[in-house]
Image (cartoon, rainbow, N blue to C red):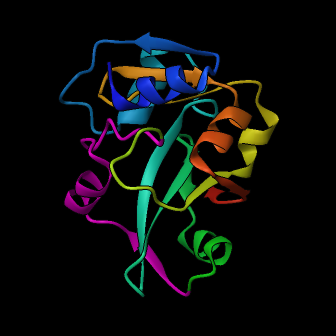
Amino acid sequence: MTPAVKVLEKAGVAFTLVEYEHDPRSPAYGEEAARALGLSPDEVFKTLLARFDDGRLVMAIVPVSTQLDLKALARAAGGRKATLADPADAERATGYVVGGISPLGQRKRLPVFLDASAEQLATLHVSGGRRGLEISLAPDDLARLTGARCAPLARR
């Protein structure tokens, strides 16, 4: 059981765990999850960490079918300039390995921003805290448990 699952169980939130066989050669973890589970890449969300020029780390959750718009994230978070965080920094801050970073149960509580497209979905999928494990849950529950603010963050 991962820290993400423990958070959901403790909160009494309805969720479903879905596992798939992770291919270590896969270059894109979220797209691999969508393909392996037969889901639309618009329903599977990736968790990315960004660093602002003042050193702050923030988390962005966007569909795997899109790219994170760093300028939009900076606007939403009140920052000037954002870049993707170094993978080692992301792993240290979250306690998860890249490709298995869940927005839930992280080691360090970070500001969280969820792409506004999530508001149109009944359920979405995020990493369960390890490669090959996805959590399906309501976007409202994810936002409530992470303190996420919704904003348009993704571009095609």
Q: Is residue 96 left or right of residue 154?
A: left
For the view shown, which residue lies furthest in the right direction?
120
Out of 8 and 117, give the one closest to the viewer: 8
Magenta highlight range: 80-103
Viewer can see residue 51: yes
Out of 91 and 110, give the one closest to the viewer: 110
Q: Is residue 156 left or right of residue 8?
A: right
Instruction: Measuring from the top left, give residue 136's x and y in whole percent.
Output: 57, 21
Viewer can see residue 156: no
On screen, residue 25 above or below 108: above
Residue 26 in the magenta stretch? The answer is no
Out of 66 and 137, give the one closest to the viewer: 137
Q: Quadrant of residue 97?
A: top left
User: Which residue corresponds to the image point at 55% horizontal and 31% vertical from the top-left?
Assistant: 44
On screen, residue 109 above or below 10: below
User: Which residue corresponds to the image point at 60% horizontal and 40% vertical from the top-left?
Assistant: 145
